[in-house]
Image (cartoon, helix red, strand yellow):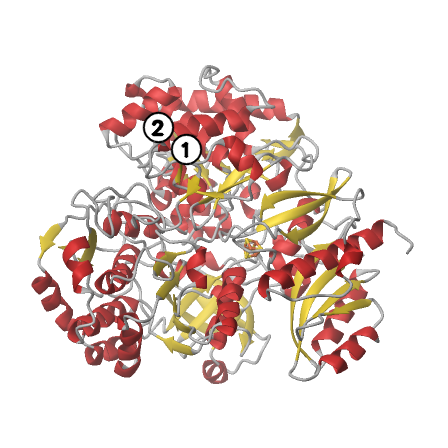
Amino acid sequence: MKFNRRSFIKGAATSSAIAAASAIFPGISFADWTKQEGASGMITWKKAPCRFCGTGCGVLIGVSGDRAVAVKGDPNCSVNKGLCCVKGYHSVQALYGKDRLTKAQVRRNGAMVEVPIKEALDIIAARMKETIARHGKDAVAMYGSGQWTIPDGYVASKLFKGCLGTNNLEANARLCMASAVTGFMTSFGLDEPMGCYEDIDHANVFVTWGNNMAEMHPVLFSRMLANRKRRNNVEIIDLATRTTRTSQAADKAILFRPQTDLAVANAICYEIIHNKWVNQDFLNNHVSFHKGKTNIGYGTEDHFAFTDTEEAISFADYQKFLEDYTPEKVEKISGVSARDIKYLASLYGDPTKKVTSFWCMGMNQHTRGTWIQNLVYNIHLLTGKISTPGNSPFSLTGQPSACGTVREVGTLTHALPHGVVTNDHDREMAAKIWEVPVSNIDPKPTYHTVEMFRALDRGDIKFMWIQVTNPMVTMPNLNRYRNGVLKDDRFIVVSEVYPTPTTDIADVILPAAMWVEQEGMFGNSERRTQHFARIVPPPGEAMSDTWQLIEVARRLGFEKQFPWSEDEHIGKIWEEYRRFHEGPKHNMAPYTVLLERPGVMWPFVDGKETRWRFNPKHDPACTNGKDFDFYGKKDNKAWIWARPYEPAAEAPDAEYNFWLNTGRVIEHFHTGSMTRRIPILHQAMPSSYVELNPEDAADLGVVNGEMVKIISRRGAVTMPASINGRGVPPRGMVFVPFFDDSYLINEVTLDAFCPISKQPDYKKCAVRLEKA
Amino acid sequence: MPIFSYLVIPTTGAIDQLYDELTAIPWCEVMVAENKEIIILVTDTPDAVTETELQKQLKELPSLQSMSMTFGHNDDNQPGKPRGDYEV
Ligand code: SF4
């Protein structure tokens, strides 16, 4: 056989398909398999986590010379066992768009001019010093990302909280994961899922709560479908506000009116108690009952403040609270038939069935985001279906390191790498590890993301450094926040890989290294930390976000806190950071272990990963001698919360008579700044659209592709209609994907948020439509 | 010059037909599993236009139930795309 580079790549392609087939169909055999073995030398394969969602699939990147040329799924990674989705397979092409930013730029007399990166870093440090001297430390801010590597987030926290002494540190995960965090904290006292993806191989019932997994978590969805095919006792129920690819693949699809998932979850609990399906033993030993404030507002006004209070209640009080949520009453609120509610309750209530609930943005981007998480946990707690293989309330993430960087490192205004700024002990621990005086760390949180951009608009913040995120596409009520950043004395630094609407408003642009052009770690949805090496060099003067921060920190006089050499800094940072999480509840794997494996789950104790927390068979942190130990709360119990249904911040009325729902598509990651530069993904989904119900389209007199103007109280966007496309909203709702910056749908959305988590609701506001 | 591989599942009973149809298409190489109704397809097209045409042709095969990609390769220089005008 003539053997050239191309035939080698085809050999690699075949091997990858065989590996994937073997993972999905154990025992499958291909006669020609041996011909694929033994080829080597033209491409070297290096492990990394995929960068295009929170699933954390392991990939092997084929490198030829200095260039990444191929991708295959890593068969050794338990997350995906050799599979990837279309974004993963094409991911390396995102490194090579022609318009990669390779040089630093500085705004001079209104125009951006290229400068050496060292000069740009000098300018940034000087501007920060000057701003702090004139306006105080809380006039400078950093806005990062769930796509930051763990070292990126760690050095940002150390610089801003430990050295500069400001809590003006936020990350875009506030927009995607904050309600998941407050849900975990209020119900269990500790963040992140108790289970792991292995739950998929054990569950009999999957309920997707407002979660289009077929497009957003396609590899996990494939794993669900493969289980349904392999075992004859698996069913999938999709509970959603619009019909999606997930609904189409589900065994049963149930539509509810926006925001009424709160009522549906309570009705399921009512029905479980009413039918005596409660796991009484579990309840008696492991659960306590609580209520908080009601009518808690929506945060649409500046300086909105809210603090919940907790009050213990009895099971009888809880039962009485649920009387407002009989299936028949909730049918009227939600549009879900009492029969379907009873069916759902019967699945959760059946002691012979293992049930996993999945959710992501539908429950997180919700003005009662914390509450809906509590309510779904209530269902699992009433039935004791938690922390055992297959029984799992499972909050998924959308970004590759929303968990690893933002939640675990704590890159939010109130948080520290361990604990919160308001806690003396946590501040002392941080000061000790960071070698700074404890008085440096301010005990008062400042601004959450929406309020931080409001502060920038008002002028309370004068300087903001934005890394790995694109807020000039993603902020809700975007017009206000764009006008804010454009005001005269605001100074914006943006670290990016491609030009975006956010680099458009920058005063300094730093070219950033992307993904495997730098060493780093991500942390995925199932508590798995995944290391990747610097596999290919970054282009031009592009520099990792970690190193950019270190360079500026040193210019600000913090050499002592940032002493590492460029060769060793990631390993050293990891080992320093790991000290924050020592102990059986959160121990992280050593750097040397991370180098070897395609990911390691924490708590990592005595060389072992913890797959199911709070379960003593799996979790060495359990010490109470019982069958479960919910050690996150002081009473060693998981908390059931009585949380009512309350309406959305803005609902359709006579003038604005449609719901607007926004989200993503499988081909593109977030704002599309990377995936739209991958030719095959761009060709597959070149531009955004507004999904309409066919009857609404007929009423409006529009056919597929005709332009529709979407108008809210805040802005308007005109875009092509999609009728009976891949998703179909019910009558009275439109859906718009946000990946396309030609159609800035966030000029239309509302900046209302969950008062507890401060996470905005991108799924619900009121609009009207006009044929354009 | 993209190279991709896929796991291809035929519609029930149509594996032989699918094999014949795939082998008749230029740019396609196939490998059939011995003990399951699964075909591995490796495609190797000279340019983006041919790739798009091939994708369309594959989607139209009646004997093909579903395809999942398992590998992607493209070492061509990619065009940059000015925002708002993503011509490829
Ligand atoms: S499912 Fe997510 S992590 Fe896996 S390949 Fe696709 S984008 Fe990457």
Q: Position of residue A54 (x, y in %)?
A: 49, 51
| Left or right of A97 on screen, residue A433 | left
**Cβ–Cβ under 8 Å for marks 2 and 1:** yes
> Residue A166 shows which numbered tag?
2
Mark 1, secondary structure of its residue:
strand
Can residue A339 be seen here? The reply is yes
Distance in Å between CA atoms under marks 2 and 1: 8 Å
- Badge 1: chain ID: A
Residue A428 image position (x, y, % from top left)? 28, 23
Residue situated in front as seen by the camera: A24 or A126: A24
Q: Quadrant of residue A520?
A: top right
Residue at left 57%, top 55%?
A: A81
Q: Is residue A367 left or right of residue A669?
A: left
In the figure, is residue A484 to the left or right of A421?
Answer: right
Label 2: state its secondary structure.
loop
On-image quarter of the N terminus of chain A: bottom right
The answer to whether tags 2 and 1 share a subunit is: yes
Instruction: Residue type at mark 2: give it.
Output: Thr
Q: Is residue A593 left or right of residue B69?
A: left
Quadrant showing the C terminus of chain A: bottom right
A542 versus A677 height, above or below:
above
How many discs mark residues in the rendered view? 2
Whole-percent x, y for residue A97 in the image: 70, 47
Chain bearing mark 2: A
Disc on res. A220: none
Q: Is mark 2 within 8 Å of ligand 1?
A: no
Residue at which label 1 appears = A141
